[in-house]
Image: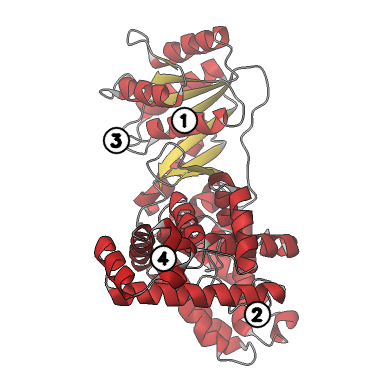
């Protein structure tokens, strides 16, 4: 039985409100579980072994660090980064304060969390100061996702009140300008292009046109190559010197592993990058290059691309990534998604009815629809820390998604009266509902039974101030 989202939302609100200072350290990005799946699994194995100890000993630390070293290397974290990282972790883990801890696993998780955050560096917002339009220059190799990233960034900036123009400064790649124009039309952002001009001149004329159009930000989608070469760097330096951009952002494909580190170094030396955008972070790559690029180049990661959708661009938050790698969940991310997607007033009213024992199957159907409007259930479950959403549900989001759809089908096959008064459901009504929903009478009975149990449980918990729930809301 899926818990209605209003209760999950209530849990998030209480968790964030009552432990806000701690929550800021224990939040994460949606994409990291997939990107760091192998690393997370390996670390959990280490933590399970440590949890059997009553006290953290040097031998335990060395054994754990050996496994962590393998996990990081398998995740494509550069060996020099791994070495420095683990030396610091070991020093802290064997400190006097930690040695008195009663729970070694929790202590190691805390140390790793702090060191991952430190290693990934402080969040670095875009620099948008100076005379308008402020130019943002995107650079990178062919296939890194520069053009789609340009559109995502333009949409992100528009959402924050900026007037954005884009320049298609890649005359070599077939249909590059047309692709950017199509994307610009989708998000309502003007795109300048003139095939007769060289890329540096094109950017200069584009800036002039942007000034006439009242733009506050100008995004330059520059040309890439299949590999690093001198001609590309010379052209990019010409554009940089002509435009004086406030940001030079490298768009790097996060799925290229250690190659992404070499690419980042290749662009950093001649261009003095101000930041990086990691594209394709929703893929199945091991993802440790994100850590390596930040450490080796010293260039901050400013955004990550998390999918093909135009809104699939997120500000990079090292605290969220560190927590996600360590399996701490993403309560803040889930809460923010709820706030931006759901009808909060309606959800609040349903929560009140549920805690008063007046919640109906009609309310429940609306809750399920709200949950589905937030995206795939598997991704939502990944954002819940262990103990709030249930480990089994987190491990198999596809199963939960299918169950949600079947539950919706059963409820939708009921009449309005039946949804409001499930006690009216006799044998013949249940057979009709099962037939209409493509399920069995047994499944209908199970849903009704679980719904009634849930309603009684939350009514009782509401009288106790939610202390009677079978999972922790505090």
Crowding at mark 2 (Cα within 10 Å: few <14, some 14-19, many 20+) = some
CA gap between label 1 and label 4 equals: 29 Å
Above or below residue 197? Residue 261 is below
Estimate the x, y position of residue 79 in percent, counting from the top left.
46, 63
* 184 vs 265, nearest the viewer: 184
Q: Between disc 4 and disc 2, whose residue precedes?
A: 4
* 42 vs 88, nearest the viewer: 42
CA gap between label 4 and label 2 equals: 34 Å
* 314 vs 389, nearest the viewer: 389
Judged by depth in the image, the label closer to the viewer, 1 or 3, is 1
Residue 76 in view? no
Q: Between disc 4 and disc 3, whose residue precedes?
A: 4
Q: Quarter holding the N terminus?
A: bottom left
Above or below residue 277? Residue 159 is above
Residue at 63% from the left image edge and 87% from the top image edge: 56
> Circle 2 sits in a helix, a strand or a loop, which is it?
loop
> Circle 4 sits in a helix, a strand or a loop, which is it?
helix
Q: Which residue is mark 3?
A: 226
Q: Between disc 2 and disc 3, whose residue precedes?
A: 3
The image quadrant of residue 16 is bottom right
Rendering colour mode = secondary structure
Above or below residue 74? Residue 124 is above
Give the label on residue 468, or none: 2
Residue at 39% from the left image edge and 33% from the top image edge: 148
Q: Which residue is mark 1?
A: 138
Q: Which residue is mark 4?
A: 37
Q: Between disc 1 and disc 3, whose residue precedes?
A: 1
């Amino acid at each position: 039985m899926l818990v209605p989202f209003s209760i999950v939302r209530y849990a998030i609100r209480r968790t964030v409100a009552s432990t806000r200072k701690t929550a800021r350290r224990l939040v994460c990005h949606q994409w990291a579980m997939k990107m760091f799946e192998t690393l997370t699994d390996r670390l959990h194995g280490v933590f399970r072994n440590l949890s059997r100890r009553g006290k953290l000993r040097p031998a335990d630390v060395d054994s754990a660090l050996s496994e962590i070293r393998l996990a990081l290397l398998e995740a494509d974290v550069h060996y020099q980064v791994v070495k420095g990282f683990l030396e610091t972790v070991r020093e802290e883990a064997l400190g006097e304060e930690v040695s008195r801890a009663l729970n070694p696993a929790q202590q190691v998780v805390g140390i790793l969390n702090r060191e991952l955050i430190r290693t990934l560096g402080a969040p670095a917002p875009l620099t948008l100061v100076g005379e308008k339009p402020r130019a943002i220059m995107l650079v990178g190799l062919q296939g890194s996702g520069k053009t789609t990233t340009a559109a995502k960034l333009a949409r992100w900036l528009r959402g924050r009140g900026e007037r954005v123009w884009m320049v298609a400064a890649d005359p070599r790649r077939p249909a590059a300008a047309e692709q950017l124009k199509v994307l610009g039309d989708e998000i309502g952002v003007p795109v300048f292009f003139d095939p007769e001009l060289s890329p540096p001149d094109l950017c200069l004329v584009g800036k002039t046109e942007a000034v006439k159009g009242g733009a506050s930000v100008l995004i330059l989608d520059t040309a890439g190559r299949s590999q690093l070469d001198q001609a590309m760097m010379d052209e990019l330096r010409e554009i940089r010197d002509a435009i004086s951009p406030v940001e030079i952002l490298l768009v790097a494909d996060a799925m290229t592993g250690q190659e992404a580190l070499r690419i980042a170094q290749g662009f950093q030396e001649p261009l003095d990058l101000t930041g990086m955008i990691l594209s394709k972070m929703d893929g199945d790559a091991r993802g440790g290059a994100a850590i390596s690029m930040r450490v080796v180049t010293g260039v901050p990661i400013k955004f990550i691309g998390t999918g093909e959708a135009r809104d699939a661009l997120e500000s990079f938050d090292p605290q969220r990534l560190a927590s996600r790698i360590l399996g701490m969940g993403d309560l803040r991310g889930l809460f923010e998604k709820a706030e931006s997607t759901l009808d909060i007033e309606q959800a609040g009213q349903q929560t009140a009815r549920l805690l008063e024992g007046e919640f109906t199957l009609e309310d429940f159907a609306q809750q399920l629809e709200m949950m589905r409007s937030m995206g795939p259930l598997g991704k939502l479950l990944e954002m819940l820390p262990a103990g709030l959403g249930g480990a089994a549900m987190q491990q198999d989001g596809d199963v939960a998604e299918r169950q949600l759809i079947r539950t919706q089908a059963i409820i939708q096959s009921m009449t309005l009266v039946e949804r409001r008064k499930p006690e009216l459901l006799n044998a013949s009504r249940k057979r009709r509902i099962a037939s209409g929903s493509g399920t069995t009478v047994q499944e209908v009975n199970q849903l009704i039974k679980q719904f009634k149990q849930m309603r009684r449980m939350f009514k009782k918990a509401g009288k106790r101030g939610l202390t009677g729930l079978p999972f922790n809301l505090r």
